[in-house]
Image (cartoon, rainbow, N blue to C red):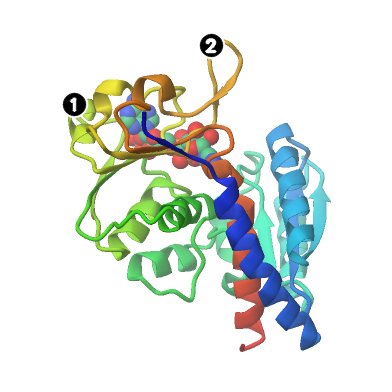
Amino acid sequence: MGQVIKGKPVADAITESIVKDVEALRMKGIVPKLKIVRVGAREDDLAYEKGALTRMGKCGIIPEVLELPLNIAQADFVKELKAVNDDQTVHGILLFRPLPKHLKMDEIKFLVEPAKDIDCMNPINAAKIFEGDKTGYSPCTAQACVEILDYYGIELQGKKVVVVGRSMVVGKPLAMLLLDKNATVTVCHSHTKDLPEVCREAEVLVAAVGKAEMVKGNFIKEGAVVIDVGININADGNLCGDVDFEQCVDKAAMITVVPAGVGSVTTSVLAKNVVKACKIINSL
Ligand code: NAP
C-alpha cells in the first residue's frame, strides 16, 4: 500500500513560517490584512471563508469580509472593488468565483490590483506564472499542489508529470509551476485520446477534473505519486476526489486523500500570499 499523504502537516509547516514573518512585520508596525469579497452567500464560499478566517487568525493576519448583494449592478460592483483596491490597509484581495452571471468577469478580472491579487485573478499575474516571474501570485490550489510535493520531498526535475485538467485556476497554472521545476509536463483534458494510457506514463499524476473517482487503477503507473485535487460528491453522497482511492492506493507510492489533502493546504497558501503581498507593497 502506498504512503497516504495528508495536507495538515504541510499547512502547519507553512503556517509556522508565516507566524514568524507576521511577527517581524508587526514589529515594524505593519499588520497584514486580507479582504474577502463575496457576492451572495453560496454554501461552498461560506465553507471556504470559514476556513480562511480561522487560518488568518492562526497566522496573525487580519481578515475582513465584504459581502455584496447577489443582484449588485456591474457599476456598483466595480465601485466597491476599486474602493478595496484603494484601501491602503488591505494587502490581499480574495474574490470568490464564480460571480453571478450578470457580472462581467472579462472586465472585473483586470480590475483587481495586481499587487493585491493573491489568488491570481488578474491576467497580469497569470502571465507572470507563464514567464516564471516570481513577483506574481499563483492560484492557491495550484500552489498547494506544489507545496505538498515540496514538503514530501518529491523531486520533480526530469520527472514525467501528467496533469489532468486545464482550468485557469488549477490545471494550466499548475502545469507552468511544474515546468518551472524542470518536470516534463503533459496536460490532459476532455478531448485527450486514451487518457488511461497517457496517465500510465506519469511518475507524478495530478487529477484536477471535477469528476468523482474518474481516475481508476488502470490510470496509475506502479510507484507513481498521485495528487488528487478534486472535491466531489459520490453516488453515496460522500465527499470524494477525482481519484478512485481504493483502486489506486496499492499501485501508487504516495497518494493524497480527499478530504484532508490538497484542500487543507489552500488557506495556508492564501495566508502566505497575503504576507508576500504585504512585503511587496511595503517594499520589504
Ligand atoms: P473545471 O474548471 O471544471 O475544469 C475541469 C477540467 O477537467 C477541464 O480542463 C476539462 O477539460 C477536464 N475534464 C473534464 N472531464 C474530463 C474527462 N472526462 N477527461 C479528461 N479531462 C476532463 O474544474 P477546476 O475548477 O479546475 O476544478 C477541478 C477539480 O478540483 C474539481 O473537483 C474542483 O472541485 C476541485 N477544486 C479543488 C480545490 C481545492 O481546494 N482542493 C480548489 C479548486 C477546485 P476541458 O478543458 O476540455 O473541458
The quadrant of the picture occupied by the C terminus is bottom right
Q: Secondary structure at mark 2?
A: loop
Instruction: Check disc 1 and give the amino acid type.
Output: Asp
Relative to 132, say whether 14 is above or below. Answer: above
Closer to the camera, 254 or 276?
A: 254
* Left or right of residue 211, residue 19 in this image: right
Camera-side residue: 202 or 121? 202
Label 2 near ligand 1 (CB < 8 Å): no
Look at the numbered disc 1 and say if its residue's Cβ is closer than 8 Å to ligand 1: no
Residue 62 percent coordinates (x, y): 80, 65
Q: Residue at x 68, y 35 (%)?
A: 44
**Disc 2 from disc 1: Cα separation:** 25 Å
Query: In the rendered view of the protein, which quadrant contains the N terminus?
Result: top left
Q: Give the left or right position of residue 197, taking residue 64 as reference.
A: left
In the image, 34 versus 70, the foreground residue is 34
Residue that mark 1 sits on: 194
Q: Residue at x 75, y 77 (%)?
A: 23
- The residue that label 2 is drawn on is 235
Relative to 156, say whether 7 is above or below.
above
Instruction: Please provide percent x and percent y for residue 261.
Output: 53, 40
Q: Quadrant of ligand 1?
A: top left
| Label 2 Cα neighbours within 10 Å, binned few <14 / some 14-19 / many ≥20 | few
Residue 207, by quadrant, is top left
Would residue 200 be visible to someone looking at this image? yes
The correct choice, above or below, for 253 with respect to 126 in the image is: above
Instruction: State which quadrant residue 202 falls in.
Output: top left
| Helix, strand or loop at mark 1 | loop
Q: Indicate left or right for 180 with 258 as reference.
A: left
- Depth check: give the residue in front, 76 or 63: 63
* Label 2 vs 1, first from the N-terminus: 1
